[in-house]
Image: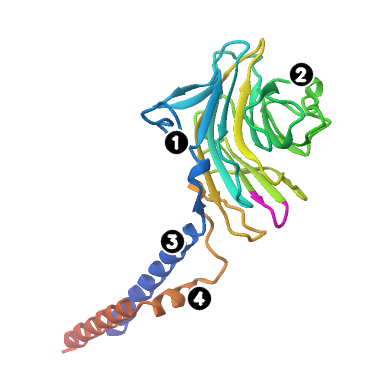
Amino acid sequence: MVFLKKSFALGTIVALFASIGVAQAAKDDDEMLEPLRTHSIYMPYIDNDLQNRWFDFGGDAIVNTNRHIRLTQDVPSQSGWLWSRLPLMAKNFQVDFQFEVDGKGDGIVGDGFAVWFTKERAEQGPVFGNRDRFEGLGIFFDTYANGRHSHSFPYVMAMLGDGRTSYDNDNDGLANRLGGCEADFRRKLVPTHGRITYNSGSKRLHMELQTNAWDEWTTCFTLHDLVLPETYYLGFTSHTGEVHDNHDIISVTTNIIPKSEDYVVHRVNNTPPPKSASGLGTVVKYVVGSGVFVAVVVFAYKAATKRNDMKRF
């Protein structure tokens, strides 16, 4: 019986070691991400001067300080945009954006919205509210099919523009598509998110979506050998034609990430995954660095042993 009590006390102490080690490891992993305030935006979006220090709004965009930035309303012939004022200089970054697409229509709706990493900024045009013949990357959240396809809509796809090539509008970008996926992101009951992770060293871009359940991420596509312009801005645009919808941006969170080629996040709120080191190695690393904690643990163990020895008599 005494042996069991000692074993229980020792097990409790080891569990305490492990929990503190894991918590410290998670904290250090969180610190690997460096928030980039210049390319992040949240409610209430504007300051006392009805401006935002880091972003511009334009076209038909409407700012609701308690809810969203509405790029277009659910009415025909609108075009709105949200663009960073400064270029995105980070070579390795992650952009997590919450969005919402909905409207009164249950049948044919459109047209969708786009996320941009381009050399140009704030130039309205026919490609989801942005200029054609752009230079850089466009990711299109398309809700209206102009032609017949083997896949369903809504559809998410990527195009790398060279400044000369036009978007293949009649075929919904089929001639330009680098990667894409079907994605049911319209009129959802859960918050819908997109997450774009880019590493300039490996030239890889990873696109993930959260559309079905909170913290349930699915890979839409991964692009390889992707080179962005030397200077590019972050933007969100949308337009409507005869068909229409509300297209809202709720928040944008941009972080600078480590240079590791295999860095892909699969946890909510931009929290990186635990390191691959073993649990024991992590525990030893952080316990050794905390003399005070070791002293407390030793004292607790001796006290528990002394109590058990006294009970034997």
Residue 217 vs 309, above or below: the answer is above
Cβ–Cβ under 8 Å for marks 1 and 3: no
Distance from disc 3 to disc 2, alpha carbons, whole Å, reads 48 Å
The type of residue carrying mark 2 is: Asn
The type of residue carrying mark 3 is: Lys
Residue 291 vs 205, above or below: the answer is below
Q: Main secondary structure of the magenta part?
A: loop
Quadrant showing the C terminus: bottom left
- Residue at the disc numbered 3: 27
* Mark 3 residue crowding within 10 angstroms, few (<14) / some (14–19) / many (20+): some
Distance from disc 1 to disc 4, alpha carbons, whole Å, reads 39 Å
- Residue at the disc numbered 2: 146
Residue 207 in picture, x, y percent from top left: 65, 43
Residue 175 in picture, x, y percent from top left: 84, 31
- Residue at the disc numbered 4: 281
Instruction: Place residue 1 in its image quadrant.
Output: bottom left
Distance from disc 1 to disc 3, alpha carbons, whole Å, reads 24 Å
